[in-house]
Amino acid sequence: MLRAAGEAAPQQPPAIAQRQGDDKPAVLSVRMTEGTLEALARFAIEKGTTQRRVIAEALAKHGVQVSSHDLEERPQPRRRGRG
């Protein structure tokens, strides 16, 4: 589905929304395979960013409206892929 959207509108700019005053942070928990999570961790480390930002940028790239707050750089936590 996402591939079809990208092919239909390849020049579509990322959907980035400004954070609204009442737009409180929330938690998303997603189960994925260890291999996928390890690959995500390695990718984020190689790019010098966080897994959270990698995911937020991927969502925006595919047209999901992402708050600018979710795209901000944050200190990298000590997690998977760092040892």
Image (cartoon, rainbow, N blue to C red):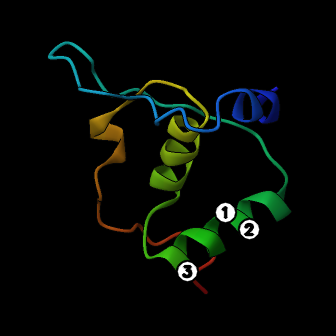
Report crowding for label 3: few under 14, some 14 to 19, many 20 or more residues within 10 A (C-alpha): few
Q: Quadrant of residue 77?
A: bottom left
The answer to whether residue 17 is seen in the rendering is: yes
Q: Nearer the viewer, residue 28 or 62?
A: 62
Locate the N terminus by quadrant: top right
| Alpha-carbon span between mark 1 and mark 3 | 10 Å
Say whether disc 1 or disc 3 marks the residue closer to the N-terminus.
Answer: 1
Q: Which residue occupies 27% across, 17% down?
A: 23
Query: Which disc is residue 46 wearing?
Result: 3
Locate the C terminus by quadrant: bottom right
Find out whether the residues at labels 1 and 2 contact each other: C-beta distance under 8 Å. yes
Relative to 68, is 58 on the left or the right?
right
Find residue 4 and report its horizontal and vertical position in percent: 81, 29
Report crowding for label 2: few under 14, some 14 to 19, many 20 or more residues within 10 A (C-alpha): few
Q: Secondary structure at mark 2?
A: helix
Q: Is residue 75 above or below residue 21?
A: below
| Alpha-carbon span between mark 1 and mark 2 | 4 Å
Q: Amino acid at mark 1?
A: Leu
Q: Amino acid at mark 2?
A: Ala
Query: Which disc is residue 40 wearing?
Result: 1
Say whether disc 2 or disc 3 marks the residue closer to the N-terminus.
Answer: 2
Q: Is residue 22 above or below residue 63?
A: above
The answer to whether residue 80 is seen in the rendering is: no
Relative to 9, is 71 on the left or the right?
left
- Badge 2 is on which residue? 39
Q: Amino acid at mark 3?
A: Glu
Report crowding for label 1: few under 14, some 14 to 19, many 20 or more residues within 10 A (C-alpha): some
- Going by the picture, which residue comes out furthest to the bottom? 83
Find residue 78 and report its horizontal and vertical position in percent: 45, 72
Query: Which disc is residue 74 wearing?
Result: none
